Image: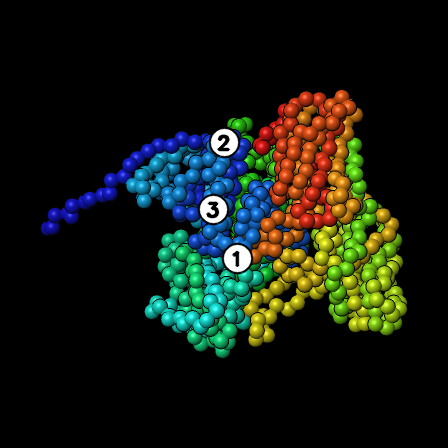
Amino acid sequence: MQSPLPQCRRTVHEQQVQAELVVVGGGLAGVLAAVRAARDGIATILIQDRPVLGGNASKEIGVPALGAGGGNNSYYFRETGLLEELLLENLYRNPEGYMEYWDATLLDLVHSQAGLTLYLNTAVDTVHMAGERIIAVEALTLSAETRTTFTAEFFVDASGDGVLGALAGAPFRQGREARAEFAEPNAPEDASSSTMGATITFWGRDMGHPVPFVRPSWARILQEADFKSGREPLLYFGNDGNILGDWWIETGHGLDHVQDAERIRFAALSLAYGVWDYIKSRSPKRELVENYALIWVSSIAGKRESRRFEGDYMLTENDILAQQTFADAVAFGGWSLDDHAEYGFDDDAPGTIFRHLPGLYQIPLRSLYSRTVPNLFFAGRNVSVTHRALSSTRLICTCALLGEAVGRAAALCLRQQLTPRQLAKGEAATALQQSLLLDDHELVGVPLCHPANLAPAAVVDASSYISCPALEHSDARLPLTQPLLHMAPVSSRLESIAFLVDCAQRSTLHYTLYLGDEKGNYFPHQQLYTGDIVINPGDAQWVTLPAPVTLAHPGWVFVELSPAPLVVVHTSGEKLPGVNSMQRHPRVLNSEGVRPYEFVNDYSDWVRVNDIWRTRHQTACFRLQPAQEAYAPGNVANAYLRPYFAPNLWVSARTDFSEPEWLQLTWETPVLLKEVRLLFDTDLDYFLRPIRTVHPFRQFPECVRDYRVEVRRDGVWATAVQVAGNYQRLRIHPLDAEPVDALRVVVERSNGAPQARIYAVLPMAAPTVNTVS
């Protein structure tokens, strides 16, 4: 019998760190959870097992951060709050979308936050429990030969794979639920352990001269027949000219995305290099990429699905389709139900089916904590949802919203000595929602009614405002060869709508008037009126269409213009919130005329004119009669902070800043203000992807740039705040808590738009519940 081999174990330094909250996972969900908790005064630790932040959106994996905007019917969709702050900062620093700058911006957000300590390259591998509660986690920083024990009151698992929750014994699910379990209409008949796959992405760049490629021996050898269901072997070209490795280069079927992660990563790497080898060497169109070099390949595979933990509520496909409302709603989603083919790249079926939703939907707090571990929150793709619901909630920006909500929830639990379950009920849940709304964290349809907000008690006036929605300046033309749908906000009563058109010879234009639905979604729902109008020959003529409608409350009105081949509609590049023009969704075809994946939209087939990906689209030039109070000053004091049944913002009427524009709130008796919160227009209908997209500006033209805040005491105005060069949507300014009877925001300049635009002025009474600044 041989004697056992001598054991030599690497010596590690051991240390203990104590905090109030520990967040495990440094993707956007974990980053925002940690930053929000730290801003709320909580001593917070963020532990990340990689050398960079961002998760799937990191420079290691390179997935552009997307979210609610992927739903074809989700307008004014962009996630706000902390995520908006981060994306606007990245836009200002990094409009070309370079991943290195994005990485630096993420790191800056975390390192500059007081009360937050970051541990990179640190992997949690042990959990200590006291009964059902987690009391500490251990993590190894191998590069520093250090083992750290982190003790805290609450923990957040934002690790994606649910490393912390699994170690703590929290119940979880993997795979696909059977249709009968939750009566989900598109779930499979039988349950299975199958999950969506993982992808290695890459970039190819035009080098200006032929670039050879030698296939590594381990790369897959692919032929044209391997690109099934119309998958496009030439991928697609980004607006920066690069070739981007697309999402359908996906593998991992039949494997466990936790235990088999390295095996899956190598299979995905082999597939990605195989795709590049094919398009460079054997594709019939290889001459198009002759000058392209493979300049970047992601280091690890981007995962879509592994563990999903069970909370007090499991969000389902039915909740999403019905846009179910929740008393404990703390975030929203809107991406389509995007359930990828079971066998990924090798599946005979389309790579995915995009089942578009009617609009945005709410996500409850009860889906963001463990039903058995009372001090454990979840944020990201591991939350309490079914497989079908996950196909929408897994999107990066949606996960980021979940992170911010959990960070605030953990802070309230700590300060008020509540469990997450207690926080999700009654007045506690309402207080959580109101505190999130104050920080511009949208909850879709939940009104702002925070008791410290003194705006509703004020009389609001302004230097000017647009008294009726209109776009009259023409900078392009659109032949009316296919139906055109125009959406506009109506306050109460509409008599007519006029369009600016050219007409080659006498024509008859048929049109139809619709109302939107009862949930404020952005597609025609109820037909009201049809008519015909005769147009005489002539250019740049205003054609008035009778459009009689009376509304019980503000809402969207839609006018569909039927095709008229001899009519050309003038369009404008100017943007007004609540105003859009749309055309029928085109069939998305690859170069062979085949759809590479399926679009299913049971609600609407309209998309913006010339702008599927929502950058800077064109809108029909139009006028409404009579006047509509869509952009009146009082909007800054109402209950909604983005378009919802109405634009909900003030827009000044003047078209230059030769004189400053101002907005004033006046109280009958003096009030004590601790701070004022301002929400500006940063075009929430624009896809603000932080990487792999070149943006045409560093700051949104609509956003107020230079402004000051004035207060009035004893009839005398004084400047309390002066700001130059702003590009953020939310600005929070502390004020001296002395009596004032009026507050005025004076706008001196925008970042390019001709008007001043403000969504909200929130003067907060002293003391406030939320003192984040």
Where does label 1 land, which residue?
Answer: 692
Amino acid bearing label 2 = Ile
Residue 372 seen anywhere in this rendered image of the structure: no
Where does label 3 land, which residue?
Answer: 104
Amino acid bearing label 1 = Arg
Where does label 2 land, which residue?
Answer: 42
Q: Nearer the viewer, mark 1 or mark 2?
A: 1
Q: Residue 770: x percent and y percent?
A: 60, 30
Q: How many marks?
A: 3
Task: Give the Cα separation between the discs numbered 3 and 1.
Answer: 15 Å
Residue at the image position 79 percent from the left and 38 percent from the top: 463
In the displayed structure, would residue 654 be above or below residue 596? above
Q: Residue 761: x percent and y percent?
A: 70, 36
In the displayed structure, would residue 153 be above or below residue 629? above
Closer to the camera, 255 or 680? 680
Marked residue nearer the N-terminal end (3 or 1): 3
In the displayed structure, would residue 12 be above or below residue 319? above
In the displayed structure, would residue 345 be above or below residue 739? below
Task: Give the Cα separation between the discs numbered 2 and 3.
Answer: 24 Å
Q: Pointer 3 and pointer 1: residues touching (CB < 8 Å)?
A: no
Q: Quadrant of residue 581?
A: bottom right
Q: Quadrant of residue 484?
A: bottom right
Q: Viewed as shown, does residue 641 lie left or right of 625?
A: left
Q: Viewed as shown, does residue 539 lie left or right of 334?
A: right
Number of residues whose C-alpha sits closer than 10 Å to that of mark 1, classed few (under 14), some (14–19) or many (20 or more): many
